[in-house]
Amino acid sequence: MLARLLHFRGLLLTLTARELKARYRGSLLGFLWSLVNPLLLLAVYTLVFDVVFKNRAGGAQPYAVFLLSGLFPWIWFSGALLDGTVSLSANAGLLRKAVFPAEVLPVVSTLASLVHYLLALPVLLVALAVARFGLHHPVGGWSILLLPAAILVQLPFTAGLALALAALNVHFKDVRDLLANLLTLAFFLTPILYPLETVARVRPLALLVAANPVTPFVRLYQELLFFGRVPGPGLWLQAAGLALVAWAIGSWIFERLSQTLVEAV
Amino acid sequence: MSATASAPAIVASGITKMYRRMAPGFQLRTLKSALLEGSLVRGLSPEEAIVALSDVSFEVAKGEAFGLIGSNGSGKSTLLKLVAGMLRPDSGTVAVDGRVAALIELGAGFPPEISGRENVYINGAVLGLSRREVDQRLDSIVDFSGLEDFIDEPVKTYSSGMYVRLGFAVAIHTAPDVLLVDEVLAVGDEAFAHRCLRKIEELLASGRTLLLVSHSLSLMEGICDRLLWLDRGKAQMVGEPRRVADAYREAVAEEEGRRHREEKEREEGTAGENSRAGAIESTAVDSSDGSRRWGSRQAEITAVRLLVAGEERYHLKSGEPATLELTVEARERLDDFVFGVALSTPRGDEVWGTNTDLEGWRPERLEGSARVRVEIPALQLAAGEYVVDVAVHSREGAPYDYRKGALSLSVTAPSAAIGVYRPPHQWRFDGGVRWVK
């Protein structure tokens, strides 16, 4: 699977660029939309949670910055899965008529979504800088240099799941609906809106949050970006392990189902 | 173009391919139902499978042009997709030696919203070219496609012919070891078709392999070294193009004749003579020289002769008077009959054909033995080989006796010519034209 994807890396990049171009084609602001969206989110959350409600989320101040440091990777993750799931059925024509490497498509969805994340990062970085140097909150730090490592760990995790879901969705049309609902649930079971510590006291909830495979990834970002700490090896290993498992299972399912892909799509 | 003795480029052995029925009651599967059944990949039960190919085997040598013919739904495209690796056989194996490029359908692999140029890169990448390799070939690809003025337009604005031209241009420039082409040559215009054929010949000459699907039998006979005739998923015949194409043509004609007869029977009910006529199985006799014969034999053509000045001949000079003579034996009294004769080239291109019905003869009675002659005062054919088909059939077309390739004749002429017709003619020159004496 990996070898084939590497073999088609040119195609991966071309298609990812096409995906991004297609999204922004004909829009007034073009790629600026990638900045406008997160800026709006930042503004709204700041207003609501830091000004109106004066939230109670423990040490996570300013709350909006904390929220975004976990929310952006989540948007990458969920966007990649939602797009990736339909990537094969949406390109049925391509798959039926041409000798097309199908495994490329879910990975393209993952990469395109990653680019959106990268484009949104500057907003978060500026917000962190303002919070640290302007408002003198103890946020951010040199740990940010390890951000690429976190992204590299999340990439195979997301791509593996996208592969499996895409192949499943070709055979079972209800995968996407199922996924959309699961993602909504998972969002609340991931410590994005709240720091992990705040649920520690509610025993069953804490267990669910800990069992959620997305939790370690989001925590990586929060530690690196918001808290300015380098996470211990435990968290890294947990994330890397999950990534490995997701990739292995994802490519296994994809290959298993790919034998009947062209006729089913 | 001849096949070499090296290892074959394509080996297909015993492939069977089944499709799942998509009719209501078969198609919809949800994840829920799969989880309840406990398996993701479900086998096909016989009642929900359609057999697209059944135990098909063949080999294609390197440098060979191999053609697939057969009616719609006979499995040609499925076979091509199996060779391309897009589908996997349910049993049997397909092995291809070398890099494959496939042109399966119109506009194969072109995302519609983006420009022709970007599509060249995407298609190139799918076929295994790096960006730099596409860069190097881009000019030549665009030039070959003849789409210079449209290359930056989105491909959704292209006509079907333009799609094919671009697809073919990309595929051929990737220099594939094996090129699979499905019916696309029929779409481009004449000039482009010629360019494609030239390019295909170049490919073949350099030892690359072609697997071609087309409904144009004359095209197939022209290009291919061998043909495989598929009939409802079964390999019917494989071999020399002319023989296979003729056999296929005859099967189609026979099928049509049978359908005619059945229709007529239905119209006339089951009573009397006609039902008996329908009950006589029409039999096609396959003889070694490629001729074929079928029909109910209520009337039989027992002999066919070409006569020149009363003498039986198999060759004649262009422009000589000729008579085609049929000896007919009627098994029963017939009041509905047509005699027909046709000339064609060995490749199957029709030269001339006519019958008594077309020329206004209204049948009254045919019984016992009869002799039918067509007298042609001057048979003005170009030099070459010709095949004569003769028939006696009902006015509806149901064959009593249809003899394809009943006679072969060779025509000689004072000079070679293009085409099949050689009218008497004379060159005349006036003014400043001089010829070496």
Image (spheres, grey):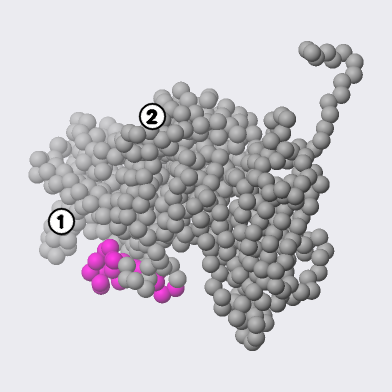
The residue lying at 34 percent from left, 55 percent from top is B15
Majority secondary structure in the magenta region: loop
Query: Residue A207: x and y, percent?
Result: 13, 60
Stretch of the chain drawn in magenta: B24-43
Q: In this orientation, which residue lies closer to the viewer: B181 or B296? A: B296
Residue matched to label 2: B130
Q: Residue at image x 74%, y 75%?
A: B335
Position of the C terminus of chain B by quadrant: top right
Would residue A186 be found to the left or right of residue B388 on screen? left
Callout count = 2
Q: Amino acid at mark 1?
A: Ala
Depth check: B10 or B255 in front?
A: B255
Q: Chain of mark 2?
A: B
Label 1: element kind: helix
Separation (CA) of disc 1 from disc 2: 44 Å
Amino acid type of the residue that numbered disc 2 sits on in the rendered structure = Ser
In the picture of the structure, the residue carrying the numbered disc 1 is A210
